[in-house]
Image (cartoon, rainbow, N blue to C red):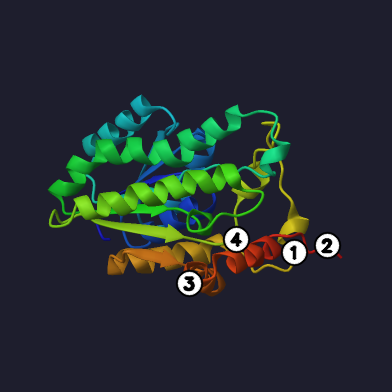
Amino acid sequence: MTEQTVVITGASSGIGEELAVALAARSARLVLAARDAAALERVRERCERAGGRALVVPTDVSDPEACRRLVERSVEAFGGIDVLVNNAGVVMRGRFEQVTDLSVFERLMRVNYLGSVYCTHHALPHLKARRGLLVAVSSLTGKSGVPGRSGYSATKHAMQGFFDSLRIELLGSGVDVFVVCPGFVATPIRSRAYGPDGSVGHEDIAEEQGKRIMDAATCAALILRGMDRRERELVMVPAPRLLMALRALLPGLADRIASRMMKPQRP
């Protein structure tokens, strides 16, 4: 990654922040994108202390014009793009029958799915010029439906389908597509979840008690290893891999297991 230009969306905290710092330690040239300019400046300082160069570009990925400007600024600053990491995302909690504000489904889709589409569309010619890498930070919910996550899961299924299709279209172009599917990761996104009424701040720690929660730095290290190997896909948690295999043979049983896995483990 030395002297390679890496654009990371959702770089102001969590997985995006830790991945940026890890890449900076390898002397990468980083473009940090997110809505929170002050948080991005903090991450930029961490990256520069780690040995990398970093450009801050405040960006709302739900705005296609902002995504175009992000790519333009990246190319102007560093001459091209080697890697695009589509990491920006928002979460929703709540069963569908509880939803009173349907607009939250559109908000999730514009950030999680369309934000990746917009950024990829503008970056792709530059990635092809350098035989680069597309990284999509999806989720285990992009592989299997999860109760209480219908809106979020739908966006990650869309993301998975888009990048799987794009991977095939890009065969022979020199551009590889790497889809990452983390499980529970300790990031601020969990405390900024949308609720069924459209309000923000619906973290439910009780729901995640008893589940293995990965720290963001460990998650970033696994992603970086996959980037080095230019892997096709990374499913980080063993149990869901078994559940996906079971779904092909006994889909009804797989649904019941998924339902039990997501029930709160209250004392």
Q: Nearer the viewer, residue 251 or 134?
A: 251
Q: Amino acid at mark 4?
A: Phe
**Quarter of the figure with the N terminus:** bottom left
- Counting residues from the start of the chain, the first of labels 1 and 2 encountered is 1
Q: Are marks 2 and 4 in contact (CB under 8 Å)?
A: no
What amino acid type should be assigned to the residue bearing mark 2? Arg
The residue sitting at the right extreme is: 267
Looking at the image, tell me whether mark 1 or mark 3 is earlier in sequence order: 1
Which circle, 3 or 2, is nearer the viewer? 3
CB of mark 3 within 8 Å of CB of mark 2? no
Which is more foreground, mark 2 or mark 4?
2
Q: Which element carries disc 3, helix, strand or loop?
A: helix
Task: Locate residue 82 relative to residue 99 in the image: left or right.
Answer: left
The residue pinned by badge 2 equals 266
Residue 79 in percent (x, y) is at: 18, 41
Q: Quadrant of residue 135?
A: bottom left
Q: Pinpoint residue 132: horizontal percent, then vertical percent.
A: 21, 53
Q: Amino acid at mark 3?
A: Ala
Could you say which disc has been placed on residue 209 in the image? 1
Q: Which residue is tagged 4?
A: 184
* Cα distance in 3D space between marks 4 and 1: 11 Å
Q: Which of the numbered marks, if any, corresponds to residue 245?
A: 3
Circle 4 Cα neighbour tier, 10 Å, few/some/many (<14 / 14–19 / ≥20): some
Tell me if residue 100 comes above or below residue 189 in the rendering.
Answer: above
Q: Decide: few, some or many residues near mark 2? Use Cα within 10 Å; few <14, some 14-19, many ≥20.
A: few
Residue 98 falls in image quadrant: top right
First reached walking from the N terminus: tag 2 or tag 4:
4
Residue 25 lies, in percent from the top left, at 38, 62
Q: Residues within 10 Å of mark 3 (few under 14, many from 20)?
A: few
Q: Secondary structure at mark 4?
A: loop
Instruction: Tell me, yes or no, whether the two marked residues, 1 and 2, touch with CB atoms within 8 Å.
Output: yes
